[in-house]
Amino acid sequence: MMKSSWKALIWIATAELFALSLWFGASVTAPELNDLWDAGANLEAWLSASVPIGFVLGAFASSYFGLADRFNPRFIFAVSALLGAAFNGLILISDGALNGITLRILTGVTLAGVYPTAVKLLSQWFPKRRGLAIGVLIAALTLGSSLPHFIVLFFSALQWQWIILTSSFLSVVSSGIIYFILKDAPVEKENKPFSFSLIKKVRENRAVMLANYGYFGHMWELYAMWTWLPVFLSASFQHNTGSASPALIAFCSFLTIGIAGAAGSVAGGWLADRIGRASLTILSMGISALCALSIGFTFGQSFWVTISLAFIWGIFIISDSAQFSAAVTEFAESEYVGTALTFQMCIGFLITIVSINLIPYLQQILGWKWVFSVLAIGPLLGLVSMAKFKTWEKRLGSPEQISKQA
């Protein structure tokens, strides 16, 4: 069983990596799309923010109708990845920014059938001690999200359309992996649907809400950093050397977001199983906040100083990501764990829409030296919340006791 579980993890993670290339697939071609559509300066922000809008809509709809419980989750993943590839590819024939943003929202809707479903598949294969397994899955998500930057390295000399096509092709491959190669887990199906009537119970569970507050702070920082760090690196290198090669920026972005994030996710999952989820999240958010506060001071400075700090930030900004949802599954009663996870995920991604769009406005006011310090607010508040979570957990002694007394 254990051998089969790790084999399944490899296929799930690979499929997740390929499908998540859709997330920033259009964002890396923002300059070309801006010229094509004659759009405004805020197009890049909305190309990134429109995906979480669709993701939230898709997550609510999927959970409300219980799609992953009514149908085989492998089928849901495969269909979602195919539809995502189609919506992403249609950008190539879109005739304006409004149509393009709409297609990005629809792509986000389909990704709500990919990422949460992958978590469900993983939980079926790893019913216990899944910290490292979830870390591997988050590593795949991180690499997949940054994969368009890697694709740019190969197609920077060709037309930008190849980047979009490659992301769509990878998502089609992802669909095939899950539907034709991955097998069903040998477990009984559990039905834990979303319900608006159960949100009150989620809000009354002190431990769950503390984990949620930590996650909300984490999400305030994460996707805004992933969206705007490449722009920061380009501006910094341009200021320091007078030029910034697109291929160099693409490589540095993939290195600091994808490679660093994947390493941090796996290490974070491994460490969480040993020192505890709360301790891991406190450590990660503390270091991540320090990076957000300090990276602006490297603007226009030595290339290696900037890249080194960005790499460290890339590790710790994602190393705790899986632990917030894991904490919810531990401390929420089975009656409403599905609702609790949906609530956490949807609010978290709604928060990213605000921070992604806030950064370009504040950059004009504060400059690159100070603008990322705004992102540090999230992990600092999240750190406080998880410190309270740790105290709460220690005082009551077990997930069962916490759930009963919360």
Image (cartoon, rainbow, N blue to C red):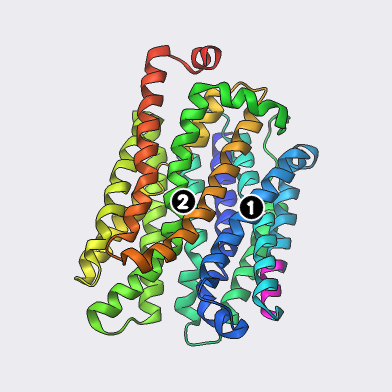
Q: What secondary structure is marked by label 1?
A: helix
Residue at 35%, 74% in the rendered image: 234
Q: Is residue 274 visible?
A: no
Residue 114 vs 46, above or below: the answer is: above
Name the main secondary structure of what is drawn in magenta. Answer: helix
Q: Nearer the viewer, residue 179 or 91?
A: 91
Label at residue 318 = none
Q: What secondary structure is marked by label 2?
A: helix
Quadrant location of residue 231? bottom left
Label at residue 139 = 2
Q: Residues within 10 Å of mark 2 (few under 14, many from 20)?
A: many
Residue at 57%, 49% in the rendered image: 350
Of the residues shown, which amino acid type is indicated by label 2?
Ala
Question: Which residue corresponds to mark 1?
Answer: 55
Q: Is residue 92 left or right of residue 320?
A: right
Residue at 47%, 31% in the rendered image: 211
Of the residues shown, which amino acid type is indicated by label 1?
Phe
Q: Please provide the residue range marked out in magenta.
A: 87-92
Quadrant location of residue 283? top left
Give the mark, 1 or 2, whose residue is nearer the N terminus.
Answer: 1
